[in-house]
Image (spheres, rainbow, N blue to C red):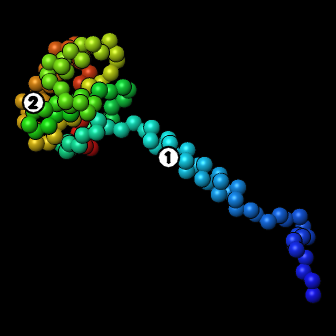
Amino acid sequence: MRFKKYAEYIYGLQPVTTVPFINILFLVFIIGGLCFGYMPTGSGVVVQVPRAITSEAVKGPAVEITIFPDGSMHLNGQLLTVEGLQSFLEQTAGRNQTIVINADSRTPWEHVIRAWDAVRASGMRNCVVATHP
């Protein structure tokens, strides 16, 4: 008995090849990985912000100031003094941006007020404190 090398389908059905499907799937994973790498992230420092019931999401461009319990401040991940913060904010005062203060829940209130005063002294009025909803 002789079998045909390639079976022919009666109604024109073709066998589904998996190689093009795997190639497309591979490209989707590569593009997804590249896009995931460019997603915006936080400042890179981790603080435990307090919880609040009435919190809202910040819309538009924002500058993140992170305050630690020892009083050190970080602006977008870089260590900063109050004078450095105030001069940075004075330089960028023309932009319509929100200043977000991320203070650890164990941070003394005086450090938060000191940062808030530096923001207001620079002429910025749109300043919020980050919380967890």
Badge 1: few (under 14), some or many (20 or more) residues near its Cα, within 10 Å? Answer: few
Q: Which percent across, then down, holds residue 42?
A: 32, 37
Q: What amino acid type is highlighted by mark number 1?
A: Gly
* Residue that appears at 50% across and 42% down: 34
Q: Is residue 83 left or right of residue 76?
A: left
Query: Rounded to the nearest whole Å, what is the CA distance between mark 1 and mark 2?
Result: 39 Å
User: Position of 99 compared to 104: left or right?
Assistant: right
Which quarter of the figure has residue 88?
Answer: top left
Q: Circle 2 is placed at which residue position? A: 111
Please, which residue is most extreme toward the bottom here? 1
Q: Which mark is residue 33?
A: 1
Q: Which mark is residue 55?
A: none
The quarter of the picture where the N terminus appears is bottom right
Circle 2 residues within 10 Å: few <14, some 14–19, many ≥20? some
Given the image, on which type of amino acid does mark 2 rest? His
Q: Say what secondary structure mark 2 lies in.
A: helix
**Tag 1, which secondary structure?**
helix
Name the residue at 19% across, 30% down.
79
